[in-house]
Image (cartoon, grey):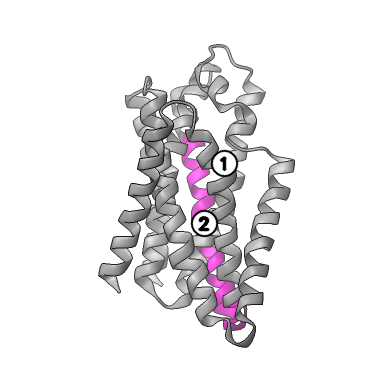
Amino acid sequence: MNIIVLTALGIGSATIVGAVIGFLFKNISHKFSDIVLSFAAGVMLAAAVLGLVVPSLEFGGKYKLLFTIGGIFTGAVCLNVIDKAVPHLHRLAGKDIEHHQNTNLNKVLLFVCAIAIHNLPEGIAAGVSFGSGDTSKALMIAGGIALQNIPEGLVIISPMLNAGVSPLRTFLIASATGLIEVAGTLLGYFAVSVSSSVLPFALAFAGGTMLYVISDEMIPETHHSDSRGVTYALLAGFCLMLATDTLLS
C-alpha cells in the first residue's frame, strides 16, 4: 500500500515541478515545449499499450478481446463526454491563453479547471494499473503520466499571472490540479482491489482514456512548430518505455 501512496504523491508532485519550472522560465519556446510534450506522448503511448491494454488481454479469460475492446472504447467515450462539457488544452486555444496579456480571468480559470478534471481519469489509470500485480509496469505507467504532467503544470502559470492572479495563489491552484491526480490514483487502485473480476475491463478502460488523451489532445497540441522534431521525440519516448519494459521483464 505504501508504494501506491508514494506513486500517487509522485504523480501529483510532477504538476508542481512543472509549475515551479513555469515560474523560473516564463519564456520557454513553443518548439521546446512541443518536443517535451511529444516525448511525454510517446511515453504514455507505450505505457498505455504495454501496461494496460496487453495486461487486459492477459487477464480477460474467455471473452478477453470483447472486454478489452469494449473497455478501450468506453474509456475513450467517457473522456469525449467530459471534453464536451469542459474542453481541454487545444480546444481552449491554449496558445492564445498562454501568451496574451490581460487575458479574461474566467477563461483562464476554465482552462485550469479543464486540466484538473482531465487529471482525474489519468490518475485512475495509474491506480488501476497496480491491480494487475505487475509493479514494474504500474510504475512505468505512473512515470509516463507524471512526465506528461510537467508541461501541463508549466502552461498553467503564465496565463494566471497574466490575468492578475497573485504568484502564491497561482502556485496553490496549480498544486491543487496535481492533488486531483493523487485522488484519482487512490480511487483507481481501490476500485480494482475490491473486485478482481472488473480488472480486465478496468485496465482496458484506463488504456482507452490514455489513448484518447494522446490522440485527441497531446499529439495535435505538439504540431505547431517543428513537426519532424516532435515526431522523433514521440518515437524516442515510446522506445524508451519499450526498452524499460523489456529490461524489467
Picture quarter with the N terminus = bottom left
10 Å neighbourhood of mark 2: few (<14), some, or many (≥20)?
many
Residue visible at 34% across and 61% down? 242
Magenta region, mostly helix, strand or loop? helix
Q: From where the camera sits, is residue 197 visible?
A: yes
Dot 1 falls on a residue whose secondary structure is helix
- The verdict on residue 186 being magenta is yes
Would you say residue 59 sits in the magenta stretch?
no
Q: Is residue 150 visible?
A: no
Task: Name the residue located 43 percent from the left edge and 60 percent from the top edge.
Answer: 47
Image x and y of residue 115, in percent: 57, 40
Q: Which residues are magenta?
A: 172-199
What separation in Å lies between label 1 and label 2 (alpha carbons)?
17 Å
Q: Amino acid at mark 1?
A: Glu
Residue, disc 1: 217
Kind of residue indicated by mark 2: Gly
115 relative to 106, above or below: below
N-terminal of the pair, mark 1 or mark 2, is 2
